Amino acid sequence: MARWRQLTKAGGLAVGALAAGAGVVIAAEKIAVGRLRLRPDPAAGELLGQLRDQSLTVLADDGVPLHVEISGPDEAPVTIVFSHGYTLSQDVWHFQRKALSGARLVFWDQRGHGRSGRGDPERSTIGQLGADLGAVLGATMPAGGRVVLVGHSMGGMTIMALAAQRPELFAPAPDEPGPDEPGLKVAGTVLIATAASGIDPGRWLPAPLRLVARQTAPMVLRSVSRGWPAAVIERSRQAAGDVAFLSTRYMAFGDPGVSPAMVDFLERIIRATPVEVVAEFYLALVDHDQEAALGTLGAVPCTVVAGDRDRLISARRSGELAAQIPGAELVLVPGAGHLVILERPEAVNEAITALVARI
């Protein structure tokens, strides 16, 4: 009995020590987040996620409803179509929607994200996203229209998939198109914080953890995508609080002084993406390889934009992508992370307007 009491006492002390340690970590997180929120916040007055335009629903080839919004005149000579990244929504293009409001702009939510519907998990692939983008173009582009495709992260991969599927859209338009020429032409592309293959969503982890994640993540995520522990994981995500704030700030942004309002905005978007969708498209990213389409992208002007502090897709990978696309221009944004479109929107907007001016 005395031995049992000793073991119980030791166990109680161990549990108490762990609880105390966890309490210290939680307290430290709260202090850190509290200090960040006390700083002047230039984005505090921004209507983040509240800008809306004329909406319509486009059906994908498998019947999934895709939410699309359009602004600007139909007679504009060029339309800019924006494809967002993994676990995000069209709302992340806030500063592009705001600054480029004089042009004809099309925004859409990728399947399973934002306001778009979900399809069969087996269709959660980059190739399917390319087909979805083709459907959006077919439904929103005026006859004979020219389009500039802008894609961030997984949205850039979506553009690559479209190029692989429909290379005729990227062929330079002849001076006098014949009757067999398609009415729609891609006049240029802007690829932001993206890569053509070899995506490792866990590359930011320390090397030993990265190896474990690579070996175990596919099995775990396939279980999640089939709905097994999804409800439990979803509850933990919603309760993450300060941990989610700090991890989003670290992973998405390069500047440690980034606006807390911006971090909160991005974290809400990510949290709104169902965990099953997160799991399904994680596997799609791991399997992603669109290098064969890069020659097609080089048929029209292309600009590759990257933050030099991107922890998810390194600036080196962006440089390699630009080198593989004939004639592509590389724009490196100092101090910016993966969400360069929110962190340094003026640099991204300048890259887009410069490419539109070229065409």
Image: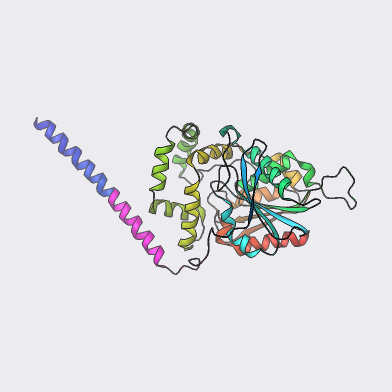
Image spot of residue 95 (x, y percent): 59, 62
Q: Residue at x 77, y 42 (%)?
A: 167
- In depth, the one of 166 and 298 nearer the eye is 166
Q: In x, y percent, where is residue 303?
A: 70, 55
Q: How many marks?
A: 0
In the image shown, does 341 or 24 lie closer to the viewer?
Answer: 341
* Magenta stretch: dominant secondary structure: helix
State left or right for residue 37 relative to residue 65.
left
Q: Height in image: 247 above or below 333? A: above
Does 151 appear in magenta? no
Evaluate whether residue 266 shows in this view: yes
Specify the segment rendered in magenta: 22-46
Judge whether 359 appears above or below 321 on screen: below
Q: Residue furthest top?
A: 1
Q: Is 189 left, or right, of 121 in this rendering?
A: right
**Left or right side of 34 for 280:** right
Furthest-left residue in view? 2
Classify the position of the C terminus by image quarter.
bottom right
Does 325 sit above or below residue 123?
Answer: below
Q: Does residue 335 appear in this view? A: no
Q: Position of residue 356 (x, y in %)?
A: 74, 60
Residue at image position (58%, 32%) is: 122
* The quarter of the displayed image where residue 346 is located: bottom right
29 part of magenta stretch: yes
The residue shown at (47%, 34%) is 224
Quarter of the N terminus within the rendering: top left
Above-or-below relation of 121 to 42: above
The answer to which of 318 and 293 lies nearer the viewer is 293
Coordinates of residue 92 in the picture (x, y in percent):
56, 55
